[in-house]
Amino acid sequence: MFQQILSLMVNLAEQTGLAQIWWGNIFMIFVGAILVYLALYRKYEPFLLLGIGFSCIVANVPGSDLTQPGGLFYYAYQGVELVIIPPLIFLGVGAMTDFGPMIANPSLMILGAAAHLGIFIALIGAKALGFTLAEAGAIGIIGGADGPMAIFVTMKLAPHLLPQIAVAAYSYMALMPLIQPPIMKLLTSPAERQIVMVQSRKVSRLEKICFPFVMAIIVNLLLPPVAPLITMLMLGNMLREVLLVDRLASTAANDLMNVITITLTVAVGSTMEADKFLNIKTLQIIVLGLIAFIGGTASGVIGAKIMNWFSGGKINPLIGSAGIASVPIAARVSHVVGLQENPYNFLIMHAMGPNLAGVFGTAISGGIMLALIGVK
Amino acid sequence: MTVPDTMEGAYILSVIDFLLSFVIIWGMSLVLYIFPYLNKLGHLDDSKLRGGH
């Protein structure tokens, strides 16, 4: 009888996660804990990092079948794999965003393209490291600093790299307040950082209502591969700007967005299982992603410096880095760095123009990339 | 025809994509320059829109 009990206990122990745990799980649980720490104590994008960190920890506790078919995390990931979640996020982002600063100052839109040099630095770097061109393109798009677009393009080009790319994209977006300021300060003089920009014109309701229709037509016409995302962005923005359907706009911007954010963070975090995540490719992607962010920030600032020279000193080069996208984090960084130099210089609305243009810039780069590589 | 999966292909893709991004964004900004002229078509009152006309 004693032997029977012992045998049952051993059998029971073998069914727990304790029998399957290895150092990789412990390392990834530590990584998840760091993400939670950054969210809780450093306040870096808690809406994203808390969910990613938590599900990363849970996904690395062996025994749980949450990430296996039948588990809830697995179904959350299906929303990513079937490219349902990224367009819905864009719907919410559109419903939350006032494109007025971009409409008011179209000349600054060009910074949305200038700040994307990082994409191509990372792409060439990835190709040199032996990745295929499709994989390199997916890695490069991390430099677009746009999470849903990074997921969308990766699912089309290299779905097997989604965990690494999604984690790199969202982590670096959260860490932008740390990554960008040193580069911005290195490339600008104190005098340039103190430039006070002229207030932009007021954009009328009619312009704001026409904007989503015009942009949806242009993007569907010129960039069909990324049209689903921008179309949803414009649909959300139209719901916001017509003012007639407050309930729909509010649902898209709040309730739906919250549900989708929870689903997305759980999906991304649950892909960070040690056996899939811990390899040399992950390390390469993490480093290339950082290079992409640094390159994009630098090229944006340089682009704004060139515009400043041509405008006769009217453009603060700090707003250039906001062209990398990551709305509104990058614009906030430009604003904060500007405030450090001059406490009465409020750059936020000026930086929002290039910041919003950066969303289009990433979509354009991604769309052209998909078309050139031959993916629909 | 698609870009070859070589180092040269990566350079070609990068150059075309980066330059074309500028052209398309520039084109979009040109469209936005026309937007102030929309106001000549009329005026929409926020309070009337909120009230459903």
Image: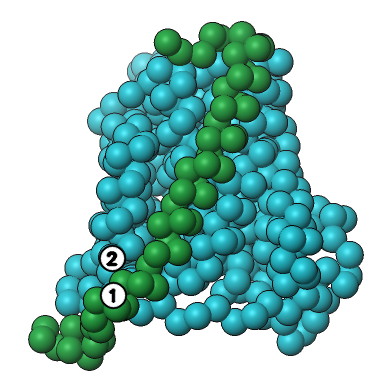
Chain colours: A cyan, B green
Q: Where is residue A361 in the image (x, y as percent from the top left)?
A: 51, 46
Q: Position of residue B51 (x, y in %)?
A: 14, 88
Query: In the picture, residue B41 is in which quadrant?
Result: bottom left
Say which chain tag 2 marks: A
Q: Residue A206 carries which label?
A: 1
> Which residue occupies the extreme bottom position in the image?
B47
In this rendering, position of residue A342 left or right of residue A328: right
Question: Callout 2, which amino acid?
Answer: Cys
Residue A46 visible (yes or no): no
Q: Give me the chain letter of mark 1.
A: A
User: Is A29 situated left or right of A86 in this image?
Assistant: right
Which residue is drawn at the image coordinates 28% and 65% (left, top)?
A210
Q: Where is residue B45 in the image (x, y as percent from the top left)?
A: 24, 87
Amino acid type at image mark 1: Leu
Q: Residues within 10 Å of mark 1 (few under 14, many from 20)?
A: many
Q: Position of residue A290 (x, y in %)?
A: 70, 39
Figure check: A71 above or below A306: above
* Residue A11: quarter of image: top left
Label 1: state its secondary structure. Answer: helix
Quadrant of image for the N terminus of chain A: top left
Near-viewer residue (A79 or A245): A245
Q: Is residue A203 left or right of residue B25?
A: left
- Quadrant the C terminus of chain A occupies: top left
Q: Quickly name the residue at label 2.
A: A210
Instruction: Return the residue nearer the eye: B49 or A160.
Output: B49
Residue A275 appears left or right of A82:
right
Which of A196/A230 is in front?
A196
Q: Which residue is the extreme one toward the left? A: B53
Label 2: which secondary element: helix
